[in-house]
Image (cartoon, rainbow, N blue to C red):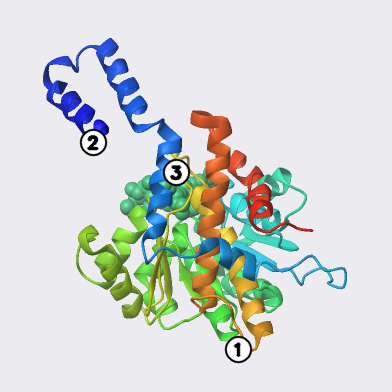
Amino acid sequence: MFVKHGMNQLSSSRNFTLSSSAVLRRQHFLIRSLAGGGHSNYCTLNRMQETNPLEADAENILRAITPSLDPTRHKGQAGKIAVIGGCREYTGAPYFAAISALKIGADLSHVFCTKDAAPVIKSYSPELIVHPILEESYSIGEGDRKYISGKVVAEVDKWLERFDCLVVGPGLGRDPFLLDCVSEIIKQARRLNVPIVVDGDGLFLVTNSIELVSGNSLAVLTPNVNEYKRLVQKVLNCEVNDQDAHGQLLSLSKRIGDVTILRKGKADLIADGEIVKSVSVYGSLRRCGGQGDILSGSVAVFLSWARQYIMAAEGNVAIRPTNPTVLGCIAGAALLRKAASLAFENRKRSTLTGDIIEYLGKSLEDICPAC
Ligand SMILES: NC(=O)C1=CN([C@@H]2O[C@H](COP(=O)(O)OP(=O)(O)OC[C@H]3O[C@@H](n4cnc5c(N)ncnc54)[C@H](OP(=O)(O)O)[C@@H]3O)[C@@H](O)[C@H]2O)[C@@H](O)CC1
Ligand SMILES: Nc1ncnc2c1ncn2[C@@H]1O[C@H](COP(=O)(O)OP(=O)(O)OP(=O)(O)O)[C@@H](O)[C@H]1O
Ligand SMILES: [Mg+2]
């Protein structure tokens, strides 16, 4: 009530005081004081949202699907992830996705990128296995296209079956030749039943060729606000309806043949054609670029772990829902948001994606200790 009253006073005085910066500063101070502090209040609001029946039981899901660190396990069993992305413009996005997968606990993380991007990505981290195999139109002659496309696809194909999940799109760019090659990689992954998380420019590609993912129950789309708008316009032939966000997301996922969609935003909404879940716990006020890339790498790892967990449970799955792609989305979204909130607590306005990545380990450890 006090907050409301204070806010009303502030808004009624807005018209004639906005020009004064001292008054503005006092207004901001008053709003923060009445609301109990910027970030902590934000978290409290999020905690209140946990009473929402659609809110996923993210912490229990994280505990259930994260594999124990067992001395009998060998390298590779905790996950082999590959990111298809990285071009002349973007080297950060594939790095963020691939390194996040390792920081969460995957054993191996590969990046398939263009020749220009590879040395840059390699230099960020020796932990990543980087394949400089993608080609953009500018670097090849008209007559070489078919031959080079075959070579690119064959090179990825050598590895494809070994991966537990592909992340297609972070920093991929929109070169038409490159995207044609990536279409073939997506088709091949589907033939081999390799799950894929489609993000960034991968979404630009599949939005224009929806048949690439349509009906693939092992595909996850992770659109941000722009990517979601394009997807809704293209597939549902209408505008985004925030009044019925859950219903529209469900319709969209149904229309694309029950693929799983994680709509990123203030609350992350997840649908698979059957159910809708929301992840709104934790979070940060900082919107620096690259957080979606962390998310795509994280979802890939948790999706792989969820599949392993469900296979091992042999029908005795202790958590709901039971679709591994949805579980992967819930776990990935919750972990990113927790890491972002910890990073923000420390770094405030200067929080960057690299800072958030540094908190992925602690965030998982708090929920699910290693030993
Ligand atoms: N540090 C890094 O390396 C990071 C790299 N990142 C990477 O950036 C890529 C784009 O992702 P993003 O999130 O900027 O896309 P989004 O919000 O739809 O676009 C914003 C506006 O830009 C425009 N536009 C975009 N791409 C375009 C293109 N190739 N050519 C022309 N226009 C283009 C777009 O226009 P529109 O599509 O609406 O016509 C919209 O108006 C993606 O690969 C991502 O992974 C990020 O992950 C962040 C960290
Ligand atoms: N308004 C918000 N409040 C809280 N968290 C948010 C908000 N918007 C986005 N997020 C968080 O940030 C994550 C990344 O979402 P974002 O929309 O920034 O993705 P993106 O644009 O694809 O990022 P990238 O810059 O990596 O491409 C989401 O999963 C969500 O957890
Ligand atoms: Mg993105």
Report how many numbered discs are placed on residues in the image: 3
- On the question of residue 90 being in view, the answer is no
Q: Secondary structure at mark 2?
A: loop
Q: Nearer the viewer, mark 3 or mark 2?
A: 2
Quadrant containing the N terminus is top left
Among all residues in the image, which is located at the extreme front? 1
Q: Earlier in the sequence, mark 3 or mark 1?
A: 3
User: Is residue 317 left or right of 241 when viewed as pictured?
Assistant: right
Q: Is residue 80 above or below residue 33?
A: below
Amino acid residing under circle 2: Met
Residue named by callout 2: 1
- On the question of residue 244 being in view, the answer is yes
Mark number, residue 315: 1
Q: Secondary structure at mark 3?
A: helix
Q: Is residue 290 above or below residue 157?
A: above
What percent of the width, then of the height, locates residue 168?
53, 65
Judge by depth and name the residue closer to the eye, 124 or 73: 73
For the residues labelled 3 and 2, the Cα–Cα distance comes to 19 Å
Q: Which residue is drawn at the image coordinates 58% and 83% (left, top)?
A: 193
What percent of the width, then of the height, locates residue 255?
31, 79
What percent of the width, then of the height, locates residue 257?
37, 82
Q: Is residue 117 above or below residue 260?
A: above
Q: Earlier in the sequence, mark 1 or mark 2?
A: 2
User: Is residue 246 left or right of 83 when viewed as pictured?
Assistant: left
Circles 3 and 1, Cβ within 8 Å, touching? The answer is no
